[in-house]
Amino acid sequence: MPENLMEKVVSLCKRRGLIFQSSDIYGGLSNTWDYGPYGIEIKNNLKRAWWKTNVYERNDIYGMDAAILMHPKVWEASGHVQNFFDLKSDCKSCKKRLKTADLKDKAKCPECGGQLTESRPFNLMFKTHQGPVEEAGSEIYMRPETAQGMFVNFINILDSRHPKLPFGLAQIGKAFRNEVTPGNFTFRTREFEQMEIEYFVKPSEADAKLEEWIEARYNWYLDFGLRKDNLRKRPHEKDELAHYAKACTDIEYNFPFGWSELEGIANRTDFDLKQHAQASGKDLQYFEDATKEKYYPYIIEPSGGVDRSVLAFLVDAYFEEMVKDDLRVVLKLHKDLAPTKVAVLPLLRNRPEIVEMAKKLAGDLKKSIITIYDDTGAIGKLYRRQDEVGTLYCITVDVQSLEDKQVTVRERDSMLQERIALDKVKDYLITKLS
Ligand code: GAP
């Protein structure tokens, strides 16, 4: 791991337009981040990869997209109004708000030595008002997890798609938590995206399905390139389980700031469906044809963070290498996650025939492959720029190309170069990228 890896990744993100501080020109809003042109591509690629594996490649999972704003009763029934708390203490001197669990000395502020207040529960849900008047009854919450949008639609899916157990719902979307101690770049923020699956199973099969999902999700991170040494599974102790969970295993990544959760896979039992059935008065049981039995399915929930995963993939892919006395920074992202697949670079930008050939090639490739054209620097600089954002192939058009109608294709990780005929280059790249 390079020294100061986290600082280097944060600096690269800003320098190359992956991730910026939100509202930067106003001094920034703390712990809030905006994804720039390359960052959004990586994030979208990651979400697409997750969706492909979990929705398109399976027969038993349906995608959906529920609203962020939900009926306030959802959060009473789910237990979030009563249970979704962190204990916090305030410093009487510097006014800093601290999470009690993080404090070694519960009475003294670690920042200024000031006296701390008694610890108090602090609900993590963001409240807002619906409608033009802020009055009692108009209060609603920004969802703290996407999960509830799927539980409340369970019956709609049964009625419209008639699935048999086991089946699941999958959703990717924003969630909001008024975290007491956000930090570590995009790792813990107050606004973030989740990718969640709610997998409904027969209660007697829940333990086995939980194990299956832990394996599937662990392997997914490996398949998309995280190094095995940096990934582990950590079963929860009984006292750290969420109020709804009977068992949970976290998939953790070895971030520069230590092993931390990427995704939790929990057995939520029938807690949520029972709670919503009771609060709404609707029958949310499943009727099993074969046995004529009616029951509440158990729910296995693989719940990951999009932003956290993007960060893990960035950190894992960051390499520094010495190439002919020069430091090369390269993001060795998996081909499906790399933001740009191909860059077309004219060797001489003052030769109109070369520029024309390069622009034409880029235009042709763009129709089937994410390609950019760049002629804003010398070739060494252009390569370095593309390596830093993980572009898989750089194509240079040179003087020779004008005569032999061939271009040089350079592969990112090995830096090996091959001459390929101009009319074969698209097929060559499509084969490599598939
Ligand atoms: N529905 C279950 C649930 O929300 P969670 O462990 O609280 O479980 C699931 O959250 C995932 O969401 C976490 O593993 C993490 O990746 C992501 N996550 C949670 N809080 C986050 C935060 N404040 N910032 C970024 N990601 C967060």
Image (cartoon, rainbow, N blue to C red):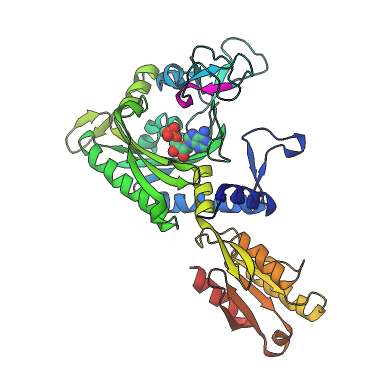
Residue 428, how many percent across, how many down? 54, 77
Q: 293 left or right of 283? A: left
Residue 208, how many percent across, how many down? 23, 42
Q: Is residue 370 magenta?
A: no
The residue drawn where x is 56% and y is 47% is 6
Q: Is residue 363 visible?
A: no
Residue furthest to the bottom in view is 403
Residue 307 position (above or below residue 238): below
Residue furthest to the left in view is 291
Displayed quadrant of residue 242: top left
Q: Is residue 100 magenta?
A: yes
Residue 275, how many percent across, how many down? 35, 21
Residue 245 position (above or below residue 121): below
Residue 268, how many percent across, how many down? 33, 31
Q: 222 left or right of 309? A: left
Q: Residue 345 versus residue 107: which sits nearer the camera?
A: 107
The residue drawn where x is 37% and y is 35% is 159
Segment tinted magenta in the rendering: 97-103
Q: Is residue 110 visible?
A: yes
